[in-house]
Amino acid sequence: MSVQKATAFAPASVGNVAIGFDILGFSVDALGDRVTVSRRAEPGVSIRAVRGVVGELPLEPEKNTAGRALLAMQEALRPGFGFEMEIEKGIPLGSGLGGSAASAVGAVVAANALLDEPCSKLELLKFAMQGEAVASGSLHVDNISPSLFGGLVLTVGIDHPRVKQIPVPAEVRAIIVHPHMFLSTRQARAILSQSVKMSDFVWQTANLAGFISGCYTNDIDMLRASFEDVVIEPQRQALIPGFQDVRRASMEAGALGCSISGAGPTLFAWATESHAQAVRDAMRAEFARRSIEVDEWIVEINSGGARVVESA
Ligand code: HSE
């Protein structure tokens, strides 16, 4: 019998991972969005409710990230029935933790479970990308891909994306520290310069190559040496109060690197397991000195990505 209703969980994600602007990201299973999609007789998409930590999102499908993703799916597949959706937000808006991506990913994964001929994850990626564009005004995949596939994910290409899940040394943990403030992705993208100095280009390219090779070869020293964004972070750091101090504190506590999660204001660090708690405490203490409340998580970087958690 056909599935009438399915709920998917889609994890949060850290975009850019310092050196991979718009192309590299990792999933964070500790929080995420849950999206329930039901069949409805008429083709098209409707959004019944948005609940959870964010309530005030548009219910018009074309203005909603998850709605737009499902509209793209309807248009391409014409399944002969429509989608009705409810969204339970677990990821705060404007946090830099890939909330809009997770809603779009959760929506397409849940809707896929209703199809008689389900799509591949790569096909779902393209639908979810349409949704992400609503939120940030541009097509980028560094949150969508890890939320969908799980773990550390590199995406090459937009029209014909190629996705690579990259192994992360087993002893590495990610420390995520979310200060309670809102930062608009659109705004954080709008301030970026459209050109890059040649010397920065060389440095950033070396760091990205070093970082990826460090992951594949379990080379912790290489990760530490290459974990520096010399292009985007210098332009965005003023948007986050205390950024320099939090970063410095994390490095003094033994982090391999520390940078902005996506467009911010969440910051993240990587550290070996034995340093992770000290790094978290140091980052939290710097925000506390400025009376900024935070949520924080220490996670492994090996989640399975979005998945159906209920169906009927
Ligand atoms: N790569 C994107 C950015 C992520 O940094 O603007 C934000 O969604």
Image: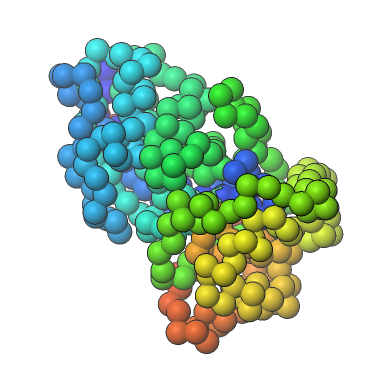
Residue 1 visible? The answer is: no
Residue 135 in the image, given as x and y percentages of width and height: 40, 45
Which quadrant: the C terminus? top left
Of the 4 image quadrants, the one containing the N terminus is top left
Relative to 286, say whether 299 is above or below: above
Q: x, y (%) of residue 235? A: 62, 61
Identify the residue at horizontal 34%, vertical 37% (top origin): 66
Does 152 sit left or right of 292 as displayed?
Answer: right
* Front-most of residues 32 and 204: 204
Colour scheme employed for the rendering of this structure: rainbow
Question: As rendered, which of 10 and 24 lies closer to the eye?
Answer: 24
Number of numbered tags placed on the structure image = 0
| Residue found 36% across the figure and 15% down from its top | 77
Q: Quadrant of residue 87?
A: top left
Instruction: Write down the quadrant of residue 83 in the picture.
Output: top left
| Residue 106: x %, y % from top left | 38, 38
In this rendering, would 300 be left or right of 252?
A: left
Position of residue 124 relative to residue 81, above or below, is below
Q: Is residue 158 visible?
A: yes
What residue appears at the point 64 percent right and 75 percent down from the top-left corner?
Answer: 244
Left or right for 269, reference 200 = left
Q: Residue visible at 45% across and 79% down?
A: 292
- Above/below status of 91 relative to 290: above
Q: Position of residue 23 (x, y in %)?
A: 62, 41
Instruction: Looking at this view, name the residue that lies furthest to the left.
Output: 41
Q: Quadrant of residue 300?
A: bottom right
